[in-house]
Image (cartoon, rainbow, N blue to C red):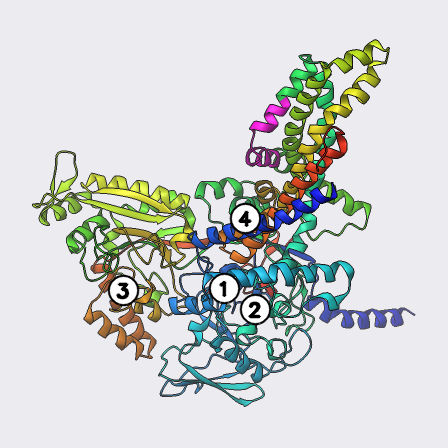
Amino acid sequence: MKRRSALYGAAAALALAPMAAWADRGEDGHLNIIYWQAPSILNPYLSGGTKDVESSSLVLEPLARYNQNGELVAWLAEEIPTVENGGVAEDLTSITWTLREGLLWSDGTPVTSADIAFTAQYCMHPEGGCAQAARYQDVENVEIIDERTVTVHFSVPKPVPYGAFVSAQSPIIQAAQFADCLGARAPECTEANFYPIGTGAFRVVDFRPNDVIQMEANPNYRDPALPHFATLTLKGGGDAASAGRAVMETGEMDYAWNLQLAPDVIATMAQGGRGVPVSAFGTLVERIEMNLTDPSPDLPPETRSTRAHPHPILSDIRVRQALSMAIDRELLVEIGYGQAGRPTCNLVPAPPIFASTANDACLVQDLDGARALLEEAGWTVGGDGIRTNADGRRLVIDYQTSTNAVRQDFQALIQQWWREIGVEANLRNINSSVFFGGDPGSPDTFQKFYADVEMYANNFNGTDPEAYLGAYRCGYEPRPETQWQGENINRFCDPAYDELHLQLAQTASIEERGRIGRELNDILMQNYVIVPLVDRGRVSAHSVTLGGVLLNTWDSELWNVADWHRTE
Amino acid sequence: MFNYTLRRLLLAIPTLLFIALAIFLLLELSPGDPMADMPLTIPPEVREQMRLALGLGEAWYIRFFKWLYLFSVVEPSHVLANMTGLDWLAIEGQRIISFQTRSPVGDIIAQRLPQTLWVVGLSYIFGIMVAVPIGIYSAYRQYSWFDQAGTFISMVGFSLPTFFTGPLLMLIFSIWLGWFPIIYDTTLVVDSWYDFGLQLRQMAMPVFVLTLYNAAQITRFMRASMLDNLTQDYVRTARSKGMTERIVVLVHVLRNSMIPVITVIALGIPTIFTGAIITEQIFRVNGLGALLITAIYASDIPMVLTLSVVFAILIVLFNLIADLLYAVFDPRIRYE
């Protein structure tokens, strides 16, 4: 009898052993996420908005994505294709992706190379208005090799071929579900846009636009033990402050996204003890852009703020440099961003290989140096403390930005420093939907730049700044002929810069790319056309009982949600 | 009376057309861009493509007439189909599509309406229920301590904006006391007493804030109207006939005083649908008010236009209802 029960015990122990080692899918119950901007749609191809891209990343997944360190990792693909492993052609005109084996959509059907080819077809349709079209630029066609393999052919050599199907912005969608949604019909597919079938850790149960999304664990997820949570609610709307409060003070929510709040406000909330703020840095840089052309309202609208009229004051590099030297970036960070910011002197602050160290002198404020430079440039202090030049022109500049508490604080501080070196700044702030709206009929867009300097933040997708740096080439400036569209906001033009950028576009070796990238960055910095202020990180908050969060600024914040779990 | 109603209804059509056009042109002229929320990393050519895909490439009058057709023909057919359950009534094909969600505007409004009706509608009913007795008693005992207290509270309700009282209540009841949640859960399905309790808890604060505001207005009307009537000759007559104070006040005076108050209440009903923009935003009640404000921020022209015109229709309609009610309650008034 005794022996028998011992045997039973052993058998039971054996049977239970794998159970103990492998956690079960959904054992951690329910997860509450709050995004203070509510998701409107779960199709990143129809909306470039961060809130929509990130919430759809719970469901839709790319072939490869960036991890929290900005490194490319294979996701649905077996490995990252490179020239070394033969995945990228020697002449850089094609890349071959192979899907992992045994992948299933959440409806149980297999994921095949046809889905990948369809995804490209969907986004590249000329009438679709695809928000991620830039990622599919230069793609000639997507050739299906076999069930799991596709080759993407490019019309030009692509040193960095990781645009299409990489990162949360360019996930694979199911061909069967979106087959009737091509081109102009894309917006009619409400069902597909709200309830996409994906390969991600969760699948949509209920989607209420601009309100709340309910999800449950994907029964066909590739790892049988994941995700740890059985269900998930993604609540949207409200404001960043109450989102932070709901995680850190009342504990109603487990994760709050992107808390753009003053550092002291976050610190007070964190004392609530229910949650902790986490921060990480990407490539977002708050900067002052100098207008190299004359925005004077006396000029006719056809040539105002265009290269036809160089700026009367800011064309002098010494003035631009003086304006930069007068700024105390450390103080700006302390007041505006706290742990979510650090002073920077570069347009490209990361990844490390592209981050230059040649401009670090700007970290120290130098009011005397700035004054000396202005003297040298012929600007002498007048009776009211504002400098004038030989022609009697006063050193007054218009300084515009979008309406935002931190930006207005920055404006006030910088106005004060500039006053100390004898420069008067007229401040202006513009509603962000107008400022960033790009309406060619509005005089207040950042592209039109009807001001002398303006401040905003920008970043680039992924880890390669080629396209980002390419914006500052000649001919890319917004002007009436282009309906004021264009990314060369400063109207900077230097043939040597263009030459160097062309070199970057033809270089594949990452060390070489790093060197050229840093050089391009240095040209812009040492010309003081862009005055970087703060390398802005991201602050999010998670509950003290939520484990596995790895804040990722290179991809979706929810990129590893499958690994999130409850800690006791 | 019937002729009058018909005439008013017919007259409402050009009024509403004019309102729709005015709103459309205002939206058209106002700055803002549906692409403004997109990250700057999306290049300008792609933005232009996206704008074209939204139909913004067409001339304004074409877009207006398209919208007008969809609004007056296609959308009502879907509403009808939903209400009757007869799917064949719905006209197939294009509907008014929201720029933000790329889904039909009508479906989103239908989804948001219940929250607004519950929270704002309930607070309106509570407001009336609280305000009428207070107004009556305040007038009857004019300048008593009760009247003074009532005046004080209604002044507080009038002058404290909901964006002050809302966060104040949240601070006290959610953060300090922890009684009520600060996030309204629209997915809650009430199928047990426990869920009903949760629903009551999450509705408590927004309903209270709005009730205070509604009651403040209606009390003042009720009180003023009662005071007007209390000094009338017929009141003295009623008293001298030997009627009890109860009958004098609650039957004779109240009935006559209710006439203007009912008009005010009827005129206020459209505000139940328009939602309480600020209160909904603060408490994250995802109703029509919150929908409108997010649509305005996102320059979602079809959504803003549709919602505004629906509100305009409600306002015009309830104006007519208020006028008709007036005639029903006051026999001296006759519309010919």
2 and 3 marks on the same chain: yes
Where does residue A143 sit, x and y in percent of width and height? Answer: 50, 88
Query: CA–CA distance between discs 4 and 2?
Result: 22 Å
Nearer mark to the viewer, of 1 and 4: 1
- Specify few, some or many for label 2: CA neighbours under 10 Å numbering under 14, 14-19, or 20 or more: many
Q: Is residue B72 left or right of residue A419?
A: right
> CA–CA distance between discs 1 and 4?
26 Å
- Work out whether disc 1 and disc 4 sit on a shared chain: yes
Residue found at x 53% / y 42%: A269
Residue B4 % position (x, y): 69, 42
Q: Residue at x 56, y 72 (%)?
A: A186
The amino acid pointed to by label 1 is: Ile
Q: Residue furthest front?
A: B336
Q: Are marks 2 and 3 in contact (CB under 8 Å)?
A: no
Say which element carries label 4: helix
- The kind of residue on which mark 2 rests is Pro
Q: Which region shows up in magenta? A: B153-171
Residue that badge 2 annotates? A187
Q: Position of residue B29 (x, y in %)?
A: 43, 53
> Which numbered marker is on residue B293?
4
Q: Amino acid at mark 3?
A: Asn
Q: Which residue is mark 3?
A: A521
Q: Chain of mark 1?
A: B
Camera-near label (3 vs 4) is: 4
Tell if the residue under mark 1 belongs to the same chain as the one under mark 3: no
Note whether B220 is above or below A416 in the view shown: above
Disc 3 on helix, strand or loop?
helix
